[in-house]
Image: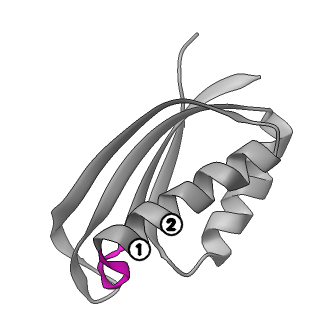
Amino acid sequence: MKKYELMLIANIDLGEQGAKDFFVSVKDMIQKMEGAIVREDYWGKRKFAYEIKGKSEGFYSVLEVTLESASLADLKTKLNRTSGVVRYLITALAK
């Protein structure tokens, strides 16, 4: 399994509790793919440098996860289809 860092921005319309629930659902999604959450860092509400999808702020969370490389494409597909995601970035971490 490889280590990845996943930065997620949730839609501001979800509200604080809705965003936290959304991040829990993403963690569940990763665990169902037999991945593991190594570290979680909830940043809360932050302003964007520029508007994204008509919004000027969102809720940020950073997850460090371990996941099989084959499951990474499936995770990306699911995140692209999830309505609460404004943006996400997945980077591979050095060993």
Q: How packed is label 2: few (under 14 Cα within 10 Å), some, or many (20 or more)?
A: some
| Region rendered in magenta | 11-15
Give the quarter of the image for residue 25: bottom right
Residue 22 shows which numbered tag? Answer: 2
Q: Is residue 13 magenta?
A: yes
Spot occupied by residue 70 in the image (x, y as percentages of width and height): 85, 41
Is 95 displayed left or right of 85 in the figure?
A: right
Proximity of marks 2 and 1: CB atoms separated by less than 8 Å: yes
On residue 66, which mark appears?
Answer: none
Q: Quadrant of the N terminus?
A: top right
Q: Amino acid at mark 1?
A: Gly
- Mark 1 element type: helix
- SS under mark 2: helix
Compared with residue 45, is residue 39 higher up or lower down, i.e. above or below? above
- Nearest the eye: 58 or 16: 16
Location of residue 31 (image quadrant) = top right
Q: Nearer the viewer, residue 52 or 79?
A: 79
Q: CA distance from mark 2 to mark 1?
A: 6 Å
Q: Residue at x 70, y 24 (%)?
A: 2
Name the foreground residue: 39 vs 85: 39
Q: Position of residue 86 (x, y in %)?
A: 42, 73
> Is 71 above or below relative to 94?
below
Left or right: where 15 falls relative to 90: left
Disc 2 residue type?
Answer: Phe
Q: Main secondary structure of the magenta part?
A: helix
Residue carrying label 1: 18
Give coordinates of residue 58: x percent, y percent. Answer: 27, 70
Q: Which scheme is used to colour this image of the protein?
A: one colour
Residue at horizontal 30 percent and vertical 64 percent from the top: 59
